[in-house]
Amino acid sequence: MTLKCINPSDLPPQQTYTQVVVATGSKLVFVSGQEPEDINGNLVGHGDLAAQARQVYANLGRALAAADARPEQVARITIYVVNYERDECLPIIEEARKTLFGDHKPADVVLGVTSLSPGYLIEVDAIAVID
């Protein structure tokens, strides 16, 4: 499996994601949106975006492991955030994201949404490419 991360010089520079990811591999892994729930399905961190983001990325890591995929094999993620305010939310999300991905920066989309499940502030899905 190979991911080639490209940030073209004629697009705005990005610190938290890669503009283009070219993936080669033999197996695609599609991970459903991971919510801020513990193993029993209980909401973690009611009203706390940071706690919820940490839980979401921890759950995403476990989902990837179940498919024998590693975080560095993730080509793309979609991040859904309730009442998304870029300057306020992005640093919180990025801190949690680094706990799973470290320096790996998959392509991403951040979508501000009106609501998720009651009390849920963030959800993240992923696509990984593995051999």
Image (spheres, rainbow, N blue to C red):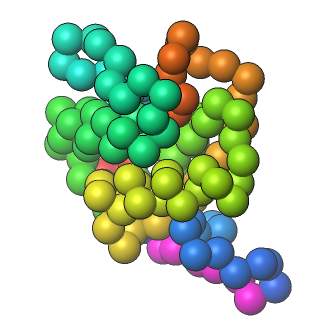
Outermost residue, front direction?
47
Q: Answer whether residue 103 is visible to the viewer in this image.
A: yes
Give whichever of 16, 47 is nearer the camera: 47
Residue 100 shown left or right of residue 33 in the figure: left
Give whichever of 42, 100 is nearer the camera: 42
Image coordinates of residue 91 in percent, x first then y, are 54, 61
Report the residue at 34% width, 44% height from top: 54
Image coordinates of residue 17 in percent, x first then y, are 56, 66
Give whichever of 83, 123 is nearer the camera: 83
Report the residue at 30% width, 55% height from top: 100
Image coordinates of residue 24 in percent, x first then y, are 43, 61
Q: How many marks?
A: 0
Q: Quadrant of residue 81?
A: top right
Image coordinates of residue 49 in percent, x first then y, are 48, 39
Is residue 20 a member of the stretch shown in magenta? Answer: no
Location of the N terminus by quadrant is bottom left
Give whichever of 70, 97 is nearer the camera: 97
Is residue 7 a member of the stretch shown in magenta? Answer: yes
Depicted 55 relative to depicted 2: above or below? above
Instruction: Tell me which segment is drawn in magenta.
Output: 4-9
Q: Quadrant of residue 62?
A: top left
Depicted 21 relative to depicted 116: above or below? below
Residue 24 shown left or right of residue 130 in the figure: right
Residue 93 shown left or right of residue 100 in the figure: right
Report the residue at 65% width, 68% height from top: 19
Outermost residue, right direction?
10
